[in-house]
Amino acid sequence: MHLFEALVAVHVIAGTIGLVAFWVPIAARKGARPHRKWGRIACYGFIGAGALAIAMALLSLYGSEQRIPSITDRELFAGLFGWMMLYLGFLTIGFADYGLATVQHNRDRTPLRGLRYQAVMAAVVVSALWCGYFGFRVGHPLMVLVAAVGLVAMVMQERFVWRKETARGDYVGEHFRALIGMGISAYTAFLSVGLIRLVPDQVFNPAIWAGPSVIGVGLIIYFTLQVNRKQAPRA
C-alpha cells in the first residue's frame, strides 16, 4: 500500500470516530459524564484526522503522483485538495484544541496566552490567509468564504483570551462555539474533499460546501440563545 492510501485509510478511521462521536455531546446533558467522555473522543478523533489531512494535502501538493487526474484544472485542484485541505486540517485542530482548553483553563486564561496555544491559532490564521488568497486567484469564492470563517473565529477567540475581565460562565460559550466550529470544518472537509472523491462530478456543487456551515451556525445560534436564557434570571 502506498503512503497516501495508508494515510487516507487511517484518516477515514479517525474522522469516522469524530463524525459519529460529535453528536453525542450535543444531544447529551451538558456537563454530564457522557458529554465529557464523548466530547473528548470526538476532539481526539478530529485532531488525528486533521493532522492526517495536513499530511495528505502536502502529498497532493508536492508528491510525485497525480491525484484525481479527472480534474483537468490542476491549479484549482491544488486549491481545493491541497491548500484548502491543509487549512481545514489546521482549523479543525485549532477548534478542537481551543474547545478543550477553555474548559481546562476556565479559571485562569493565562496558559491560553502562551506559545503553546498561540502557535496553533497562528497556524490557522496563516493557512486561512493563503487559502483565501489562492481561492481568489483561481476564482473559487467558497475557498475565500471558508477562509473568512476561520479568520473571524480566531479573532473572536483572541478577544476572549486577552480580555481583562470575563464573567464566570463565559468560557461555556467559547467552548461550544469552538467545538461546533470543529464539527463544521470537519464535515466540510469530509463532504468537499472526502465524499467528493466518490462523486467527483459534484465537486463544485455549492450546497455540498455550504451545508455544514448552515447547520453549524444554526446550532451555535440555538445554544447561544439557551445560554442567554439561563443567565438572564441570574443577572
Image: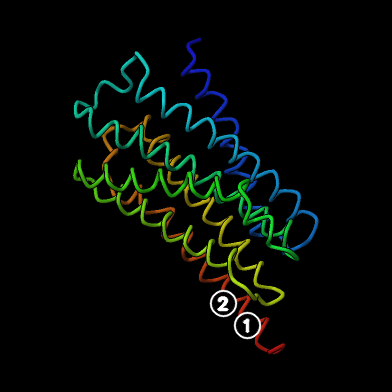
Give the image quarter of residue 233. bottom right
In the foreground, 163 or 90: 163
Q: x, y percentage for residue 84?
A: 37, 40
User: SS at mark 2?
Assistant: helix
Q: x, y percentage for residue 198?
A: 38, 30
In the foreground, 78 or 69: 78
Q: Is residue 36 above or below residue 83?
A: below
**Could you tell me if the residues under marks 2 and 1 are in contact, i.e. CB atoms within 8 Å?**
yes
Q: Is residue 56 above or below residue 170?
A: above
The amino acid on which the numbered mark 2 sits, given as a three-letter code, is Leu
Q: x, y percentage for residue 45?
A: 63, 39
User: SS at mark 1?
Assistant: helix
| Residue on which disc 2 sits | 225
| Residue on which disc 1 sits | 229
Q: Which residue is drawn at 50% across and 44% down?
A: 186
Q: What colour scheme was applied to this rendering of the protein?
A: rainbow
Q: Is residue 75 above or below residue 7?
A: below
